[in-house]
Amino acid sequence: MKLFKALGLAFLSLLFTVNLVAQKSYLDDADYALYQEEKYFEAIEMYKKAYVKEKGRDVKAEIIFKIAESYRLSDQTEQAEVWYDKSLIAQYADPIARLRLAQMKMQNGKYDEALVEFQKYVAEKPTDPRGKLGIESAEKAQKWKDNPENYVVEPVVLINSEFYDYAPTFKDKKNTELIFTSTREGSMGNSTSEVTGDNFSDLYYSQRDKKGKWSEPVLVEGEGVNTEASEGAAVMNSRRNTMYFTRCKVEKNGFVGCQLLSAKAQGLKFAAGEVIPIASDSAIIAHPAITPDDKVIIFASDLEGGQGGKDLWYIKQESRSQWSEPINLGTQINTEGDEMFPYVRDNGDLYFASNGHMGMGGLDIYVAKKKGESQWGDVENLKAPINSNANDFAITFDGDEDKGYFSSSREGGRGKDDIWQFSKPPVLFVLRGLVRDLETGEALVAATVKLVGTDGSTAEKETGADGTFEFADNGSQSYINLNTSYAITVSKPGYLNAKGKETTVGITDSKIFSHLYELQPITEEPIKLPEILYEFNKTTLTEQAKDSLEFLYKTLTDNPNLVIELLANTDSRGSDPYNLKLSQGRAESAVAYLVSRGIERDRMEARGMGETALLISDAEINKMATEEEREAAHQLNRRTEFRIIRDDYVPKNSINKEEGGSSEEEQSGGEE
């Protein structure tokens, strides 16, 4: 990748040995530019010239493969995919071309096509774990893309340029000052890198104002920080008085090596950088991260003894200026691929970029949980949308919240690599609904909807002209809060109250709750209850009858000021005295049941109507054609209803509270 070449990093170890006989100068020069100097742009042109002159079929196939490699290593994934495909058509013998083609399809977001190529590679090289890992990655990547995590990501427009901008880190404790790496014009090194085709990278500085706007980036000031070499990938210690950063020297014949340096902060400037001796000058030591206690520095390197590619290593502080020998983070973190750009969060978790773990293509960002002193494990991919099919790396968090910045080469940015910001949107809840007349279905205007939360909050609104209401976050007030249950009361003069419940307990994502409330109008006419069945010729309530009385029970509890008359009706069969006695007993048994449920006795009057209020007369019933129709008509007559007598009842416990208390008998409801 270009961005690593900007720091002098050889992105991937070569997986094959060049055994081509040096017969053509173009080919010799191209091989040297590719393998020794990492001048990929130059190598591409030389290989294309060598291809024209070459006659041998096998050599031509290998040249095509090397062109593809040059495109891949210079981060031109679309061209790399084209040329790997050409190498397979040209019958390049090494199956690595198939693996590389699959990897490029992954980086280009073609997960279905990548899966096919990985499967073909596994058939050719069943013992290579990279094939099986690729299959799993292609399958998971598509799922992660289709079902992204709850993050919002967007490029930081005011910071990014048309060049490479990456590796952000905060300079101050308030997280309002940002240092990042860039190859934009104006760098100290005015030469063009033959590796990246851009300027050498430098460290830049930007400040965020109270409105969240970032200032125009400027070079970090300080003697010996930015030089004609490549500087980048910085991090500040916890006290924000020392910066650690990377410097890579690149000469005419290629890169020389990378080192870690420290520089003391002097206001907005820095003192001269001092090298932290870790390995020889020719080694690659880059991308420092530091633990919250400032005692351990983690970095990326190709030191001997690693797992392959670039690994993450660490050194421990032994005295004020003395650090331990480098220690590899081990196989839970490092793979045969590359692990780079570490970052240690305040809680001790380690974040890093890798192309060796299961990912979405290119570099992905991972988190590893802290397991002990300088030990991390349980590596987890951050998934989409933080990760993508492009290269995603160099994350930093803005405090303890789930927000911060990272670097990415994905589409939608301004340049080749850009700085993106991420955040979890606030969890917002909305309660909305419609209130209408139960009898007519018409929307009810100016009905009152009241919320009472278990967190002590209350809120009240009226329905609009269309009968709707909404409790939503208006920026200054949140009506529906996390982990809270709400009692909902809907009322309007001339109607019975309706009540409901809602809860956000256990809900972690934003949600809209919708409700329909139908209010029963208060009239002089009786209100029919659901069918209540009694034992034949008895007043005893059946279990079904008790279920049916739940409607009346809820009506009385939702409307504590109502006093009702409970009316029991029979059909016309049987004598008038018998029907009156039977219906009176049934009405009283219904009232008794409601009293047992806690409804005050003096709120209900039981009245047996017998056959005095038939809905369907005997004459009408006798005209019906079938016995089934006639029986259904009798059933309609055998109904239980209630009529509202008044709505000014005051519960005794309310009176007691107002009068300062009363006898135990009165508090329990008095005599029945």
Image (cartoon, rainbow, N blue to C red):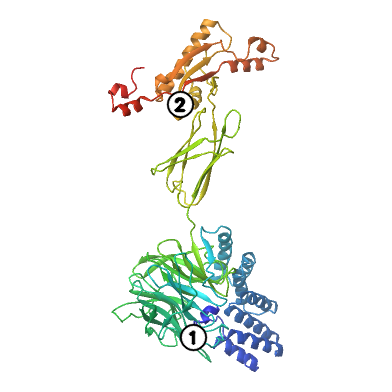
Q: Position of residue 524 (x, y in %)?
A: 54, 19
Depicted 612 relative to depicted 5: above or below: above
- Residue type for callout 1: Met
To which residue does mark 2 refer? 556
Q: Position of residue 528 (x, y in %)?
A: 55, 22
- Residue type for callout 2: Leu
Depicted 279 relative to depicted 427: above or below: below
Local SS, label 2: helix
Depicted 620 relative to depicted 407: above or below: above
Quadrant the C terminus occupies: top left
Local SS, label 1: loop
Q: Earlier in the sequence, mark 2 or mark 1?
A: 1
Q: Position of residue 506 (x, y in %)?
A: 44, 48
To which residue does mark 1 refer? 188
User: Considering depth in this image, is 245 or 533 the residue closer to the camera?
Assistant: 245
User: Considering depth in this image, is 460 or 334 the residue closer to the camera?
Assistant: 460
Residue 614 marker: none
Sort mark 1 into few (<14), some (14-19) or many (20+) by Cα contacts within 10 Å.
many
Give the mark toward the camera: 2 or 1. 1
Q: Is residue 207 visible?
A: yes
**Structural distance between the alpha carbons of marks 2 and 1:** 82 Å
Are the two marked residues, 2 and 1, in contact with CB atoms closer than 8 angstroms? no
Quadrant the N terminus occupies: bottom right
Is residue 625 shown left or right of residue 661? Answer: right
Q: Position of residue 308 (x, y in %)?
A: 48, 77
Depicted 669 relative to depicted 423: above or below: above
User: Considering depth in this image, is 328 or 515 the residue closer to the camera?
Assistant: 515
Q: Is residue 127 visible?
A: no
Residue displayed at 40% across by 19% down: 602
